[in-house]
Amino acid sequence: METIDLGQILSYIDTHIYEKITLGELAKLAGYSPFYFSRLFSEAMGMPVTGYIRIRKLQHAIMSLLEGKKVLDVSLMYAFDSHEGFTRAFTQLFGSTPSTVKKYMASYRVPEYVVPVTDFRRKKMETNYTDKLQENLHQLIYEVLTESIKEALEGYCTEIEVIISDDGTIKITDNGRGIPLTQNKHADQMILDKILAGHPITNAEYSQMGDFSGIGMQTVNSLCESLQVCVYRDGMRFKQDYVRGIPQHEVLSEKMEHLSGTEITLKPDTSIFGSTTPSDTEVRSWLKERIEDIGHLKVHVKKQIMRQIRLYCN
């Protein structure tokens, strides 16, 4: 089967990122008809060329927003037809408005374009593709649990609870010390950013990621369409919400009598993981291997059927 020089095409797109890039000019560069070029590109990258161009423009737009440029100016800079169209496309891709990103996102670096080793169509046909997807989904949970287990190993945590819901959310709670937050909103956000703040990861980036072992909490957050952290400490509750790694507001705090600890509720990005669901059996097995020598630690893994709960509440 014929192929295209993807490196040349992707480089051209980045070099002309501020311009209107047409299918026709890319097809001419590749030496194929627009129809055939479009087909080859989609098979290799797993998305239409127009979709890829939009993603790259929006990724570069994040950098421009963080440099202090106005949303309107950024929309014109990257050749969008209107401010509204830019905001709509940006929010649809990243889950946050340009204004939210500009105000709360700590930092960002535009990912390098990567020419896939295996084209996306073949990759999805691989027999282990679904298994790998589920394995990576479980790794998101294990990264969060690892932090709770560290608290237990240091003698500060005696109980961990995992609730896996059929709506795709996973809640992990421990009764450790809780992240050291102090009601200083700026300092608290800096602490949470250091631990959790990430950036949206697209399907194209995910497809090029390697081993998920030890990916860290920032990457976990980046691969979640929503993540909420609640910290209970010193008679206070602190809360922050993230969408694809981006904070959504200032750290919220209120007085609350509650045992110390941390509660993280996450929902893996369905645009990447689809309807893949974690197995409570696998989570139990993973935990059993790692806590058998921690005699004081109790662990509970539960499944929750949200449809039944909603029906009961109604």
Image: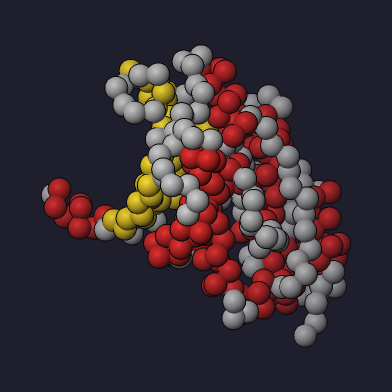
Q: Is residue 44 visible?
A: yes
Total number of numbered labels? 0
* Above or below: residue 237 compared with residue 120: above
Colour scheme in use? secondary structure
User: Residue 105: horizontal and vertical position, in percent?
Assistant: 60, 31
Q: Is residue 62 left or right of 143 when viewed as pictured?
A: right
In front of the other: 89 or 164: 164
Image point (78%, 69%), residue name: 117
In front of the other: 126 or 213: 213
Q: Is residue 289 left or right of 52 when viewed as pictured?
A: left
User: Residue 234: horizontal and vertical position, in percent?
Assistant: 40, 18
Quarter of the rendering occupied by the N terminus? bottom right
Q: Is residue 132 left or right of 2 when viewed as pictured?
A: left
Q: Is residue 268 visible?
A: no
Q: Is residue 304 left or right of 193 when viewed as pictured?
A: left
- Quarter location, residue 189: top right
User: Residue 300: horizontal and vertical position, in percent?
Assistant: 35, 51
Image point (62%, 31%), residue name: 194
User: Residue 68: horizontal and vertical position, in percent?
Assistant: 68, 24
Image point (37%, 20%), residue name: 236
* Above or below: residue 43 compared with residue 244: below
Image point (81%, 66%), residue name: 6
- Specify the farthest residue to the top: 184
In front of the other: 42 or 265: 265
